[in-house]
Amino acid sequence: MATAVVASLAAASAPRLLPLTNLRVGCRWALQQRKRCFELARQWSSASRFLFPERRVELREGKKERSLLVVAMDQVTSGKARSPSADDHTEPSSDAESELLHSLYAIPSIDKAWAIPSCQGGAGFDVVVAMSQVNLPANAKRTFLSTVYIPETSSATITDYHWSPFPFEISGASLIVPSPSGAKVLIIRNPKDSTSPTNLEIWGPGQLLREIFVASSVHGSVYGDGWFEGVSWSQNEESIAYVAEEPVVSRPVFGQSASTPGQNSNATLEAGNWKGQGDWVEDWGESYSGKRRPVLFVANVSTGAVQAVEGISRDISAGQVVWAPQPASPDGPQSLVFVGWSSYAENFSTPRKLGMKYCFNRPCHLYHVEAPVPDREPSDAPREATNLTEGVSSAFSPRFSPDGKKLVFLSAEAAVKSGAHNATNSLHLIDWPTDLIRIGEKPQVKDIVNVVQHAEEGAFPGLYCYNLVANPWLDDGSTLLLSSAWRSQQVILSIDVESGNVSRVSSSDSLASWNLLGLQNSCIVATVSSPIQPSSLHLGHSASVGSPLKGGKEWKWSAINVPSLKFASKIESVMQSMKYELLQVSPPKADPLKSLSVGSGQPFEAIFVSPTGSIRPLTEEPRIESIPPLVVVLHGGPHSVSQTSFSRNAAFLSMLGFNLLHVNYRGSLGFGEEALQSLLGNVGRQDVDDVLAALDLVIGNGMADPARVAVLGGSHGGFLATHLIGQAPDRFATGIARNPVCNVSSMVGITDIPDWCYVEAFGKDGLSNYSEAPSVKDLSVLYQISPIAHISNVKVPTLFLLGAQDRRVPVSNGFQYVQALRARGQEVKVIVFPEDVHAIDRPQSDFESFLNIGVWLKRFIQ
Ligand SMILES: *[C@@H]1O[C@H](CO)[C@@H](O)[C@H](O)[C@H]1NC(C)=O
Ligand SMILES: *[C@@H]1O[C@H](CO)[C@@H](O)[C@H](O)[C@H]1NC(C)=O
Ligand SMILES: *[C@@H]1O[C@H](CO)[C@@H](O)[C@H](O)[C@H]1NC(C)=O
Ligand SMILES: *[C@@H]1O[C@H](CO)[C@@H](O)[C@H](O)[C@H]1NC(C)=O
Ligand SMILES: *[C@@H]1O[C@H](CO)[C@@H](O)[C@H](O)[C@H]1NC(C)=O
Ligand SMILES: *[C@@H]1O[C@H](CO)[C@@H](O)[C@H](O)[C@H]1NC(C)=O
Ligand SMILES: *[C@@H]1O[C@H](CO)[C@@H](O)[C@H](O)[C@H]1NC(C)=O
């Protein structure tokens, strides 16, 4: 496709003819100087097309605007170019960028891994790795499994591993869950529509052992969302507990032969009848549209019988189920522990369900319930599930220790209590007596790792972990491993649950990010990646084999190279010249009258990624033009974090020749609770100033040319991008926003998380002053903190990427801002993805988004 550079022109004065040579010069000049392009085009002749050796220029007139198309001639003549048509505004793509992005899409990602004891016994084991590659034409993902055998080893580095010769694609599987012994695997295939059955396949070493079809009248899709999701094999591997959507609620039938509307809802429709809609059922908001309540089920592996778990109130959404330890007496009842979320948002005193996705401030508790015995008649009066964590407002990710004597869990109580959507987590423990906690008993909750308010330099900044692996324990049975954000890195931590001692297990020499996938024989399976290196598999074990593994021990790491993992050689060579570093940014001076917490005065970080290899000028003063243009990249949330891990889309921008600055402004995860809380009530000011402080730092260091800076962000990052082009209009040449928050006073009435608007705008008061019917006074504050309040200052072209199914920041929020910009005569490009939700991550949408972002950035800052 041709490089079609489209400049929209406000209706201009009558053009006059220019000589061709002038035009050629003018055109080159126009390509370099976008602004001048407008003036030039305004003077151009009424002739609509010119041809000359390198460029073809077209001036086209629409009803209201003129467009100037400059098409690279070499691409036109190569035959690949499409001749631009009247509606060509949306095709600024190019072969080179598209090819580069395609080769980045070909890089497989390592999604999960299961470490499985070897069937030969001993310390050797297998690691089954689930990887995926994007299938762009199908707009889907291909998942495939490969196995590597890790032999028993006494030396500190593992070199003698064997991969299976090639991977196998697993198509149509929603979940893959090996049994603890590794002798069986459960593959769940969710139904394609609401009337088809769900398919559970149980495979043994050599064959399919059982296939269970669960009718839609029993349950709908099994949850595989990473949050409510939970599939647990019982210790004897005879039963499976899992979370699925409750069956469809029947809809009323109306019409002539429907005797009593709403009654015979089950019946097949007769002629002249139709189904009504029935009552509205509230769902969990963004990404859960139309999803029914999560409910627990137990399947008997040998008979295939499935039974719903009784004793859970209809008001509770249940998830993350695990089996409690086997009862001491063989015929004692089996029981389950699960997480329950009330439909009533207690902390905001509202009877509604507030959006669940990405929000960890929803109160939740652990419950203990008797497991049903499939095929046996359910009892008439099932015993109510017991609330195990009444004293803690948030409890999730329950895991029993290998001896069954301890139940540990994570808590986001700091988020529940402050109202922030994410905050610093804590880790807790319940002693689980061997003589079995009786259902109904209320145990004592102990604290293991508390919320860290602020940390000294280099010290543990607090827990930022939202999910534990299925078996997080080292062989000593009391050391638990997890991955957590540690400033701008993701690290692996070991926690001694007896002393609460936390130590860093992943190498502290490297700036890369580590993710724990699983454990076997005290050997850690992890992935490591960095902005300049896609994920690779690593194995870690204690340097002193056999010694008790307490905090602070040395760990040795070996890379387990996946033989098939090869990238396009061009990518490999570009990545080799890339560099990144972490910058420490001092917070801008605050209002001296405000009392500041210690944590909010500590430096925050920014990740600087450079494609050229030289981050800082080494010898003489660099010429400012030789510095790559800079893209400031801002994460959403705001309580989320940009990490030093690999991102295909960020790598794409680097490879196009941009320096990237990912700013972890105060409020980001990983920097202690005080720094995080300092943002509440100060959005649109403190975060904006933090980004500008980081930008000043790189400009001051000679790492950026102030004339060639762009800002890019999604969600809260889009809120910041639009704020920055309004509040600091001279600092950015363009802004790019994906599903941005632009007008909080309009968002509050239409989003699934109106609580976010209150907490971010009003801080602590937001929790107590929350209202489902905001007052005019509240609305005016919400307006004041919004980017739309600064729209009259915006003077640069902008690109918007919007998902029409977004319930978090509904598409009207971005559109309102876009229309306001257009009305002011600003150049705006908008792409709407009709099927996409907040994340805009469906493969084809993601591809189109970043291809356009790349081409747009080249046009405005290169
Ligand atoms: C599974 O069902 C069989 C047959 O009813 C029964 O003998 C067995 O105990 C059941 N297993 C479990 C774990 O409930
Ligand atoms: C609805 O259908 C189910 C299964 O087909 C059946 O068991 C049940 O009796 C039916 N209920 C009514 C009210 O017809
Ligand atoms: C469990 O306890 C908490 C804290 O007291 C309470 O808010 C919650 O409603 C309880 N859950 C149920 C189902 O009663
Ligand atoms: C926990 O850490 C402290 C300080 O590092 C150390 O003194 C103590 O011995 C550790 N406790 C255990 C049980 O390892
Ligand atoms: C909360 O943190 C998780 C993990 O980093 C992140 O995926 C999510 O977007 C965050 N949510 C918000 C609202 O910041
Ligand atoms: C922002 O939202 C409010 C509330 O919906 C609305 O009244 C106002 O017109 C919006 N502002 C702009 C500039 O669109
Ligand atoms: C919250 O409500 C209290 C009492 O109604 C009021 O005094 C305070 O100003 C409110 N805070 C905000 C930020 O509106």
Image (cartoon, rainbow, N blue to C red):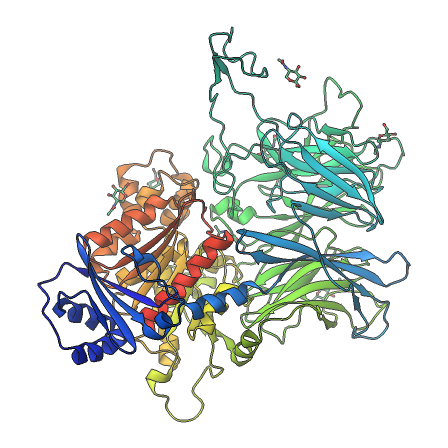
Q: Residue visible at 33% across and 44% down?
A: 812
Q: Is residue 762 left or right of residue 287?
A: left
Q: 53 or 222, which lies in front?
A: 53
| Residue 115 image offset from top left, x and y in percent | 77, 57
Q: For residue 161, which quarter of the picture?
A: bottom right
Q: Is residue 728 above or below residue 343?
A: below
| Residue 111 image offset from top left, x and y in percent | 64, 57
Can residue 150 be seen here? The reply is yes
Quadrant including the C terminus:
bottom left
| Residue 257 image offset from top left, x and y in percent | 50, 7
User: Which residue reaches farthest bottom?
Assistant: 620
Q: Is residue 376 above or below residue 575?
A: above
Q: Is residue 264 above or below residue 673?
A: above
Q: Residue visible at 75% across and 40% down?
A: 201
Q: Residue visible at 54% across and 51% down?
A: 138
The mark total stands at 0
| Residue 636 image offset from top left, x and y in percent | 44, 56
Q: Is residue 690 left or right of residue 328?
A: left
Q: 444 or 25, which lies in front?
A: 25
Q: 227 or 505, which lies in front?
A: 227
Q: For residue 127, which quarter of the picture?
A: bottom right
Can residue 647 be seen here? The reply is no
